[in-house]
Amino acid sequence: MNDIFRRLREQTLENPGTATFSRRPALAPIEQTVDGWFCLQETGNVVHWSVATDETEPVVDAARKASLIGRMASQFPLATWFLPAGAAARVCRTCDGKGHVPGLPRELADKVACECGGLGWTAG
């Protein structure tokens, strides 16, 4: 197992609510959803894991993938190693490259993610 992925996974599992990941050692949690989790794989792929069915579905949209990894990287800097190196990227149209949704009250600014995941750019 890649040392960066292993350590990143260890760090993410220190968060409460991640106990179910003991049965899925090849996944690092990114963000919880209604029916499961968005997760990072050691390959750098992002999947949605359904806890109920124990099935994974790949996230194929490059912009969504970069956004999820970017959001993860805001808390766990090792995740930047897994950001896709795309030839096409553009300044995020929502935040204009600042990495946060403009106009939000301070108490929401850390809770509402921009479409870029805080990176300031989106995959094109």
Image (spheres, rainbow, N blue to C red):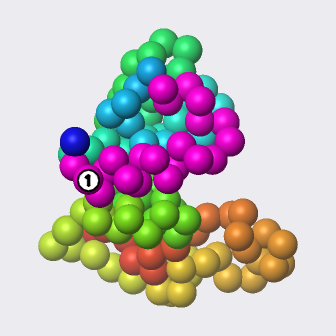
Most common SS among magenta residues: helix
The verdict on residue 14 being magenta is: yes
Q: Position of residue 99 (x, y in %)?
A: 54, 79
Q: Give above or below for 89 relative to 73.
A: below
Q: Please tell me whether residue 9 belongs to the stretch shown in magenta.
A: yes
In what element is the residue under mark 1? helix
Q: Amino acid at mark 1?
A: Asp
The C terminus sits in image quarter: bottom left
Can residue 30 be seen in this snapshot? no
Q: Is residue 34 visible?
A: yes
Callout 1 crowding tier (Cα within 10 Å): few <14, some 14–19, many ≥20: few
Tell me the residue at 43%/34% (across/down).
Answer: 48
Image-quadrant location for residue 60: top left
Q: Which residues are magenta?
A: 2-22
| 84 with respect to 14 (left or right) | left
**On the image, which quarter does residue 114 sit in?**
bottom right
Please determine whether, in this image, residue 84 is positioned above or below residue 43.
Answer: below
Horizontally, residue 92 falls left or right of residue 100, namely: left
What residue do we see at 43% from left, 69% from top?
A: 77
Residue lying furthest top in this view?
53
Residue at mark 1: 3
Residue 79, percent from left and from top: 38, 62
Relative to 117, does residue 1 appear above or below in the rendering? above
Q: Is residue 92 left or right of residue 90?
A: right
Percent position of residue 67, x then y: 44, 61
Query: How many dots with numbers?
Result: 1
Q: Residue at x 37, y 30 (%)?
A: 25
